[in-house]
Image (cartoon, coloured by chain):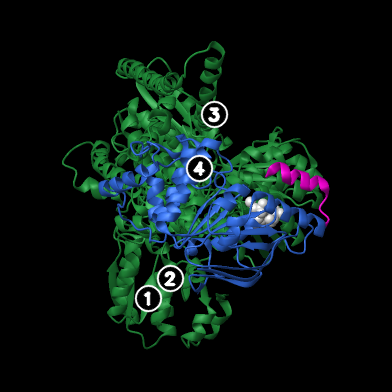
Amino acid sequence: MELWVGAIILGFLYAFLTLGSFLTFRVLHFPDITVDGSLTAGAATSAVLIAAGWNPFLTLGLAFLAGAAAGSVTAAINTRIKIDGLLAGILVMTGLYSVNLHLMGRSNISLINHTTFVSCLEKINPGLPAEIWLLVCLVPIMALFWIAASLFFKTDLGISMTATGNNPTMAAAAGVNVERMKIFGISLANGLTGLSGAVVAQYQGFADVGMGIGTVVTGLASVIIGETIFPLRSIYAKIFSAILGSVVFRLMIALALSAGLNPIDLKLLTAVFVLGALVLPGTFAKWPKARAAFAGFPRSATNLRRIRIALPGVAIAVLVLWSAVHFSQHGVIGTKICRIGIVQISDHAMLNTTRESFLKEMNVQGYLEGKNCAFLYRNAHSDTATINNILDDFLRQDVSLVVAISTPCTQAAINRIKDRPVLFATVADPFVIGAGKSDTEHKPNVTGVYGAVPMDVLLEKVRATLPGAVRIGCIWDPSQINAVVNVEDFRKAVERHPELTFVGTAVSGTSEVYQGVLSLVQRGVDVMVLPPDNVIYSAFESVVKAAKPRKIPIFITDVERIQDGALAALGYDYTSSGIQAAHLAERILKGEDPGRIPFQKYSHLTFALNTEVARELGVKFPPAIVSSATRIYGDKSAPCLGGLQASTEKAPSPGRVRRLALFHFTDSETVMRAVKGFMDELEKGDFLRRHAVKVDRISAQNDWNLAQAIARDIVRKKYDFVVTLSTPTLQMMVRTNREIPAVFGMVSDPYSLGAAKTPRDHPANLTGVATSPPVESALKIMRELFPKARKIGMVWNPSEACSEASMHRARKAAPAYGFELVEATAGSTGEVLDAVKSLAAKGIDLFFTSNDNTISLAVGSVAAFLHQQRIPYFSNTPVHVEQGAFLAIGADYEEVGKETGRMTREVVSGKSPKTIPILEFVPERVYINRGLANEYGVKLPQPLAEHATFIKR
Amino acid sequence: MIRIRDFHKRFHAGSINEVYPLRGINLHVRPGDFVTVIGTNGSGKSTLLNAIAGAFPPDSGTIEIDGEDVSGKKDFQRAKHIARVFQNPFVGTAPEMSIAENLHMAHLRGKKKLLRLGLGLEQRERLREEVRQLEMQMENRLENMMGTLSGGQRQAITLLMAVVAGPKVLLLDEHTAALDPKSAAQVIALTKRFVQNGGFTTLMVTHSMQQALELGNRTIMMHQGQIIEDISSEEKRRCTVEDLLDKFSELRKKERLTAEMLERLRRSY
Ligand SMILES: Nc1ncnc2c1ncn2[C@@H]1O[C@H](COP(=O)(O)OP(=O)(O)O)[C@@H](O)[C@H]1O
Ligand SMILES: [Mg+2]
C-alpha cells in the first residue's frame, strides 16, 4: 500500500515541475535544461531557511523565487545575448551547482528535526495513517492548483504567452513583447520547479545538492505520459493530464521496482519511453494514411484516434493486472517468512563488503534465505530519488527490518520509515543526518553501527613512515560532506606539528582530479593523503597517474584500493562492521527494542602496506609501522619491511619467550604518546631481549565489544603479563583476569571503577599508575596568576561520571585557595553556552572546566564568548588551549607511559604486583595561550614561564 | 499619416553579405490613402513595410506615424497602430490556438496583457459576428484550431485580425500571392471592403499590375531600394498595365538590364 500511496504523493509533489515542463516544452517550445539546477535551488533555499527556523510554508514562496531567478537568467541569456536556449540552460544549470552548494554550505541538509509542511499537516491529522493523511491533504491542493493553472491559460496573459510560444511573429504583431514574455514564462516554469524541489525536500526530510539530476527528463516524461493517456485539447484536460502524468510516472517507477526490475535500468527505460512517446504518434499518423492510400480506404482519422486512445488503455490495463498479480503474491508470502530489506546507495567496494559480511554473518546466525528468511537487496545506483522508491517497495512487501547501508540510504530510511526498525551500517556520522543526539538517545526505531576514519591516526602513520619536515598534499571535493569534515580534522592534526605543511586543493568532479593532483605536485608536496571522499576515490587512478612520475607516496583511507598504487592504507574493516550490524539485526529480530540499543561505533581499523609501491618509491618502513600493519600487499619478505614481518613469523628463539600484552583502547594521539613512553622505558638497556619478553600491542580501536573480546582472548592465550593503558581496557581486564600479573596506566580513578579499594588494597595480580586530572594544581595556578580573583565559574554535566568527580574535587579544594565556586550544569552540548552565559551574568572572575566531554565539544564557542567577556578560561585538557582556552594544566602522558613502564619492569623482573602499591602519578604540564596572557596582562612567574608550553593562536 | 524621410538601411554592413535594400526612401502617405506598391523582386518592398512596422531601426533618416517620430520604437511598441498581413498564411496566425483565441489576440493589440479572463461568452459572441462578415461559414467553428483551416481561410482570418482592432496603418505584403485564384479573389474582395469601411491608411505590396492599378488611390514603384515612380489617382485611371511594363523597359535601358531579365519580368506580370 505504502508503495502506491507514496508514489502518488511524490507524483503530486512533482506536479509543479511537470507543469513547469509543460509550460516550457509545450507552450513556449523552449527546451529548458535549467530545471536540473532550479529544482535543487528551490530545495536548498527551503532547507536552509527551515534549518534557520523559518515557517516551512513561507519558505515555499522563496523557493519559488529562487527557481524563478534561475529561470530568468537562462531566458535573459537566450533572449538578450542571443545564445541558444539549450546552451543557455546548460550554462545556468552548471553554474547553479556552485550557487546551490554555497547556499547550503554543505552538500546535504537534514530536516529531520525541523518543522516541515509535512509535520505541520501531521499535527492536524485526525488519526489516519500519516501517508494517507498527507494524500488526503494534497488532493484538494492539487485540485486547486489544476483549476488555477487552467484559468491562467485562459487569461489575456496566458493566451498571449501561448501565442508567444506558438507564433512569435504573430504575438509581436499583436503587441506582445516577445522577449519579455519568454523571460516571464521561463521564470514561471522554473519557479514551479523550485517549488517542487522545496516540497520534495520537505517530504523526504533532506535537501541534497545532487537531487536535481535528471529533472528535465522526469518533467518531460511526465508531460508526455499525460498527453498519451489524455490526448485532449482543452486546456483543463491538458493541465489535468500533466498532473496525472506526473503521478503515473511515479507509479510506473514503483511498478518497475516492485516487479523486481533492476533500478540501474530505470533511467534508460525512462529515456527509451520518452523517445518512443515522441516518435510513435508521428509514425501512427503516417502509417494509416499510407495504408489508406494503398488500399483505397476512406480517411482513417478515426483509426488514428482509436490507436492513440487504445495505446494508453492497454498500458493501464497491463499496469492494473500486473499490480493485482503482485498484491496477491506478496499477500501470500508476506505472512510466512521474515523479510529483511537491504538498501545500498552504490556499488562502492566498502558498501559491498559491508553487505556481504552482513549476509554471511546472518547466515551464521541461522537466517537462511528462502528457508526462514528473505533478503531483499536493492541498490539505488547513486540516485537519491530511487532510494525512496526502494523504501516504499520494502514497506509494500512488509519487511520486518530495513538495513540501510551508506549515509544517503540511512538518511532517507530514517525519514521514510517510522513503523518498523531501521538498522544502519557504514555511516560516518549518524548525528548530522538526524538519527539521534547521542549513542543512547536516538530515534526509537533506529540503531546501527557507524564511525569515521581517524585522520589523526593516519597522520601518525604518515609521520612515522616519512619523518621530518614534510609537505602533505590533500585533495577533496567539497560537495562530499564527509570529505570536508575529514579534511578539516586532518588539517587541524597537521597544524599541530610545526614541521608539517598542509597543502590542499578542492576540485569538483572526477574529471578535475588529475589536474588537481598535478597542481599539488607543482606546489612541491612530498606525500599525498586522501581522506574518505567518493569522488576522489572514483578517480583514484588519476591520483596515482599524477603522483607516480614524481615518486610521491600516497596514503589512503580505503583499504580496498591498496593494490591500485597507494603506499599505505588505513581504514575500517568493513567486514567487521557488517558482522556487527548482523549482531544488532539479530537482537532486533529477536524482539529487542531498537530504541534501547545504543548506536555502536565500529572501529576495527585495518592498516595495509604495499611493498611493491614501497620498492618503486624507495621507501623503507620503520619497525613500528610494519608491526602495526594488518595486511601486506605484495612480497611479504620485501627489504622495505626490514625483515620484520618475516622474523615475527619464524620460530621463537630458544628458551621460553614470555609474552606481554600491551592493551589500549584507542589509537588517539595521547595514547600513542603513552605507548611510546612505555616502550622506550622497556627497551632501555635491551631489557626486553635480556628478559626474553615479546610485546604484543593490541588496540581495541575504540570499540567496547572488541575490547571485551580481546580481554577474553588475552586470558585464553595465557599471556605472561598484561599492561592496560586507559580506563576501559582496565575495566575489561579486571573482570576477566584473576591470575596474569597486570599493570595499568592512564587511569584517573581506579577506585571508583572497583579495580582497587585503596592504593595498597588491591587484587593480588594487579597494580598500576593512577593519573587524575590536576584539579587542585589548576586552582593553585589560578590563585598565583590572578591574586584578586574571587569567583570561579564551572560548568559540568551531571550525567558524566568523570565530570562529576572533578566537580567534587574542585568543590572541596576551592575554599583552600580562597575561591568561591559558582556552578552551572549542562545536560548537552547545546546547553553549554547558555550555562556559561548564566555564570558570566553572576560575575565570575575565572572559568574552569575539568574532564568534561560535553564541554569539550563546545570549547570553541565557549572560549570565544569568554574571551569577549575577558574571563580567563582554565582547563585540565591541553587541546582546549589550541581551541581558544587561556591555560590548561594536564598530564604529560609520555611520562605516564614511562612510569607505567618502570612499574612493568619491576613486575617482569619478578616482583609480585601485590607488593607494589598503586602510584598516584600526575606529571603536570602547563599549556598557555601567550596571546591571551598578554591581553589579560598576566605576569608569568619564572618557573612557570620556563616549563610551560606556549601555544600561539 | 506616414512620413518617411531619407530612410537608409543596410544589412550585414561591411561583410561580403552586405545588402542595401533601402537607399534613401522619401514617402508621405496621407490619412486614408490606399497605396499599392510594385517593383522588381528584391527591390525592397517588403523591407519598406518592415521598416514601417519597426522590425529594425533606420541607419539614417526618420519615420513618423500619425505625427509621432517612431524611428526608435520596436515592433511591439508600434503594434498598437500598425496591423500587417504577410504573404505566407502561416505567419499571421498561431496554428495551435483556436480561431477565437487568435482573434482575441488581435483585439489585445496595443492593450496590456493582464490576468483577466477576457475571452468570455460576450467576447465570443462579438467575435462570431466579426467572423460572419467574412461570409466563409466559419462563424460556427470558432473553437477549431487555426492549423486545421485552409490557406485562404487562414488568410481571411488574418486579414480580419489585422482590421478588428482598428489600426491606423494597414500593411499588406503580397497577401494573396500564395493562394489559389478563387481564394485570392475572395481575399482581395474582403480587403477592398474592409479598407473602404474602415478608412485605414493602407500600403499593399502586390505583384499583379492589374491589381495595383485597380485598387487604391495611389501606386508607387520601387527599384533598387528607391521609389522611382509615384502615380497619383488621376494618372492611375489613365495608366494601363502596358504603360507600367514600358516603365520597366525604360529601366532596362537606363540600367542595362539584360534582355533575359526583362523577358522574365514580362512572363511574371
Ligand atoms: N533582415 C534582413 N537581413 C538581411 N537581408 C535582408 C533583410 N531583409 C531584407 N533583406 C534583403 O534586402 C533585399 C530586399 O528584400 P525585399 O524587401 O524582401 O524584396 P522584395 O521587394 O522582393 O520584397 C533582399 O536582397 C533581401 O535579401
Ligand atoms: Mg517581398
Tag 4: amino acid:
Val
Q: Which residue is mark 2?
A: A875
In-image side of B178 versus A615 (left or right): left
Distance from Cα at disc 4 to Cα at disc 1: 57 Å
Which chain does green denote in the image?
A
Question: Where is residue A630, by image quadrant?
Answer: top right
Q: Secondary structure at mark 1?
A: strand
Q: Earlier in the sequence, mark 4 or mark 1?
A: 4
Element assignment for label 3: helix
Q: Disc 3 vs disc 1: which is toward the camera?
A: 3
Dot 4: within a 10 Å radius of its alpha carbon, few (fewer than 14), some, or many (20 or more) residues?
A: many
Mark closest to the chain's N terminus, 3 or 1: 3
Type of the residue with mark 2: Ser
> Whole-Å distance between the Cαs marked 3 and 1?
75 Å
Q: Give the alpha-carbon distance from disc 2 to disc 3, as whole Å.
A: 73 Å
Q: Quadrant of the N terminus of chain A?
A: top left
Q: Which chain is blue?
A: B
Q: Residue furthest left?
A: A126
Residue at which label 4 appears: A216
Query: Where on the picture, by quarter, is residue A142?
Result: top left
Left or right placement of residue A65 versus residue A573 in this view: left
Q: CA distance from mark 3 to mark 4?
A: 18 Å
The answer as to whether the residues below labels 4 and 1 share one chain is yes
Disc 3 to disc 1: CB gap under 8 Å: no
Q: Residue furthest top?
A: A295
